[in-house]
Amino acid sequence: MGKISTKEIMDGYYKSIEGTSMALQRATVDKPALYEYENKIGKELIDMDVDELIGLIVHLKNTRKGKQIRFLITHSSIDNIVTVLRALFDWYIYNVEVIINPLNDKRMKGKALLESIAKNMEPFNWDYVKEIISLIHVDKESDYADYLELILLMFHDGFATAQEIIMLKEEQIDHRHHTAKLIGKTVNISDRCYELLMKFHDMEIMNSYHKPCFMLGWHGGFFKFPVMKKKEDEVYDVQSRFNDRTLKEVSDIIPRLIMTHINDQYETKINYINLYYLGFYDYLVGKYGLERTQQILTSSRNSADINELMTSARMYGVTQENVSHLKRYLRPFIVVADQASKE
């Protein structure tokens, strides 16, 4: 049994690195979910073995409101948790007592760790997103359900950030071929996404979002937002106030809509990053097939595979130039899919 509590370990470690960038990582592990897990298994952090630490990682990253998410939704954040846990154990060993650091076990590293975390989890795939979209259409009014669906589709189709969506202009869209010409890439817009994009671009007022809202683009943007009006407002008053918002303020609206109207309601953890990289993964599968895609993404030092991956990434518009980092973003799809193929 450890000589000091988890809280004392946290305080001691983070005091020792105060003022550094690592100090900003405290909330990665030191949060209510950690102490919930300690109570659940009847052990404090420093007493956990490898299997219990793997369970902790799953609890920290794949649990929402006490329920485990059925798919692996993390990418590099798993590495962040492991890094913080290893540092906490190292601090304890150096400052309190010498013990074996379980984070140095081979089961806590690389592919072995990811396979353990992914065990019993489903792949995060578009079929799951479609399930969520179906629920949205059951639970919400028609126009607003379509609007939320549009947001999910745009990220999956290849818009990497909310800023890319907000800054999209009419002249960038090829209406004949359903493409959007962005800086450094061309996004192929699916038929359903194009249909919904045009629907809301042509809409002036949405009546199914709490109360009637003007549909407005930011500084002439093609994508429109539902913006509430005050009783006596004319559309130009609301547009002027909306344009006064910063790009960051407007960009924050989109992930907040996903969080509030999808994740909170359906106890899931969808975000724009995993939607975007799922779109890229689906692009690779369409180009190479599932087996070849997994081969490309799981090989370690094959220069031909690396070249194919990075060439495809540039063609799709992925800006990540580090192949290891790119593969981390694709982990939720590759590891689980590889494991499922063995069952």
Image (spheres, helix red, strand yellow):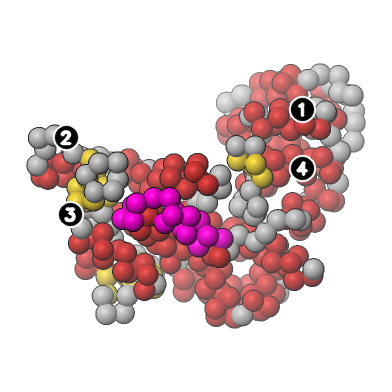
> Mark 1 or mark 3: which comes first in sequence?
1
Q: Is mark 4 on a helix, strand or loop?
A: helix
Q: Do the residues labelled 2 and 4 touch (CB within 8 Å)?
A: no
At label 1, the amino acid type is Asn
**Which stretch appears magenta?**
128-144
Seen in the picture, residue 140 relative to 240 is either above or below; the reply is below
Q: Mark 1 points at which residue?
A: 39
Dot 2: within a 10 Å radius of its alpha carbon, few (fewer than 14), some, or many (20 or more) residues?
few
- Could you say where residue 256 lies in the image, as x and y percent from the top left? 41, 43
> Mark 4 or mark 1: which comes first in sequence?
1
> Mark 3 or mark 2: which comes first in sequence?
3
Q: In which quarter of the image is residue 92?
A: top right
Dot 4: within a 10 Å radius of its alpha carbon, few (fewer than 14), some, or many (20 or more) residues?
some
Residue 230, numbered circle: 2
Seen in the picture, residue 270 relative to 193 is either above or below; the reply is above
Q: Name the residue under label 4.
A: 55
Dot 1: within a 10 Å radius of its alpha carbon, few (fewer than 14), some, or many (20 or more) residues?
few
